[in-house]
Image (spheres, rainbow, N blue to C red):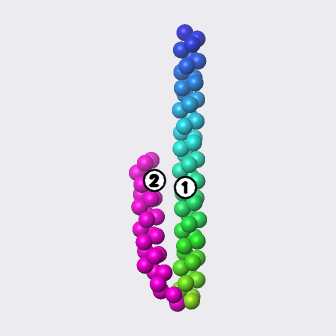
Amino acid sequence: MVVVVVVVMVLVLVLVLVVVVVVVVEVVVVIVMMVVVVVVVMVLWCAQKNHHHSLLSTWSILTEQLTMRLIQLFVRF
């Protein structure tokens, strides 16, 4: 009986740890994405100031990929 209780406690602990790790990873990924978006926006803004419009196509591709990644993240939740 004691063994069963110990096993259940260990399983619960492992589950909690896994959930915590997953949540931390998701949060880190979201933060990294936000940083990337900010950097891209800054680059685009500087480019617009200097009138380099060749970056616009790159910008659209980047935003597409980022939105896809974000959708995947939310789908996983």
**Residue for point 54% across, 62% down:** 33
Q: Could you say where residue 48 lies in the image, as x and y percent from the top left?
A: 53, 86
Query: In this rendering, is residue 28 above or below 48?
Result: above
Q: Could you say where residue 15 lies in the image, as x and y percent from the top left?
A: 53, 32
- For the N terminus, give its image quadrant: top right
Instruction: Mark 1: give few (<14), some (14-19) or many (20+) Cα within 10 Å.
Output: some
Q: Is residue 63 magenta?
A: yes
Segment colored magenta: 51-77
For label 1, the SS is helix
**Residue for point 41% across, 61% down:** 68
Q: Which numbered disc, 2 or 1, marks the residue that appears first in the sequence?
A: 1
Question: Which three-letter amino acid code belongs to the residue tagged 2?
Answer: Leu
**Residue for point 58% across, 36% down:** 17
State the mark number for residue 73: 2
Magenta stretch mostly in which secondary structure?
helix
Which image quarter: residue 32? bottom right
**Furthest-top residue in this view:** 1
Q: Which residue is mark 1?
A: 29
**Residue for point 54% across, 57% down:** 30
Q: Is residue 57 magenta?
A: yes
Q: Could you say where residue 47 lies in the image, as x and y percent from the top left?
A: 55, 84
Query: In this rendering, is residue 1 above or below 19?
Result: above
Q: Left or right: where does residue 72 sit relative to residue 35? A: left
**Marks 2 and 1, how far apart at CA:** 9 Å
Which image quarter: residue 70? bottom left
For label 2, the SS is helix
Question: Which three-letter amino acid code belongs to the residue tagged 1?
Answer: Val
Q: Are marks 2 and 1 in contact (CB under 8 Å)?
A: yes
